[in-house]
Image: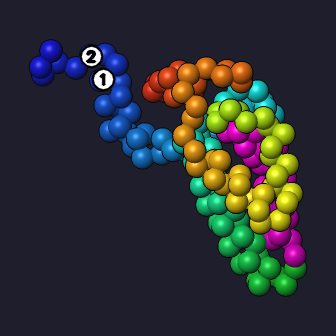
Amino acid sequence: MSGRLSRHDKKIQKLQNRGYAKIKSMNYYIEVLKKYAIFDGRARRKEYWMFVLWNLIITAVLYFVAAVIVTSTNSQAGNILVDLYSFAVLIPGIAVSVRRLHDIGKSGWWFFLAFIPLIGAIILIVWAIQDSKPGNNQYGPNPKSASSVVVPAA
């Protein structure tokens, strides 16, 4: 099939021409928000770390906006933006962390290590960096083997 593209390849090429490929990492963030309080299943490394990345970017922008509001109006009203956002992503953040622990074969209860200063955070980061356990485990199928390209409706 040299020179001929399949229907699927044409759709992907059209999406890439529209700039879709540039924001593909944002889809992982949105998927975590869609699974707002779903603690079952597994989350692959990419899903977890893209959520963390976008969460940090959005938080940094909100802190900047809050700082501008606070300095220009001498009120703490700007901090409400940061507080609301932090509260809104608290449950999805915990849920994706639990699903990430499931992906490496650990119970979600290990998330409570986060409450042990420094040592707990280090252990959780090391586990979050680890690759998925191959094949199915007690928490479900491996998301790497079940993943496919998500093509939104045109």
x then y, percent, for residue 149: 45, 27
Question: Disc 1 on helix, strand or loop?
Answer: helix
Q: Quadrant of residue 6?
A: top left
* Disc 2 and disc 1 in contact, CB within 8 angstroms: yes
**Residue 88 pos. (x, y %):** 81, 48
Q: Is residue 154 left or right of residue 125?
A: left
Query: For the residue carrying disc 1, how many other residues have a C-alpha within 10 Å: few (<14), some (14-19), or many (20+)?
Result: few
Of residues 32 and 74, the one drawn nearer to the viewer in this rendering? 32
Magenta-tinted stretch? 76-101
Q: Residue at x 86, y 71 (%)?
A: 77
Considering only vertical position in the picture, is 40 above or below 78?
above
Q: Residue at x 35, y 28 (%)?
A: 12
The circle on residue 6 is 2
What kind of residue is marked 2? Ser
On screen, residue 108 versus residue 62, left or right, reads right
Residue 137, by quadrant, is: top right
Residue 61 place in picture, x, y as percent: 65, 66
Q: Amino acid at mark 1?
A: Asp
Residue 34 position within the rendered picture, expressed as x and y whole percent measured from the top left = 71, 33
Residue 117, by quadrant, is: bottom right
Q: Is residue 10 left or right of residue 103?
A: left
Residue designated by label 1: 9
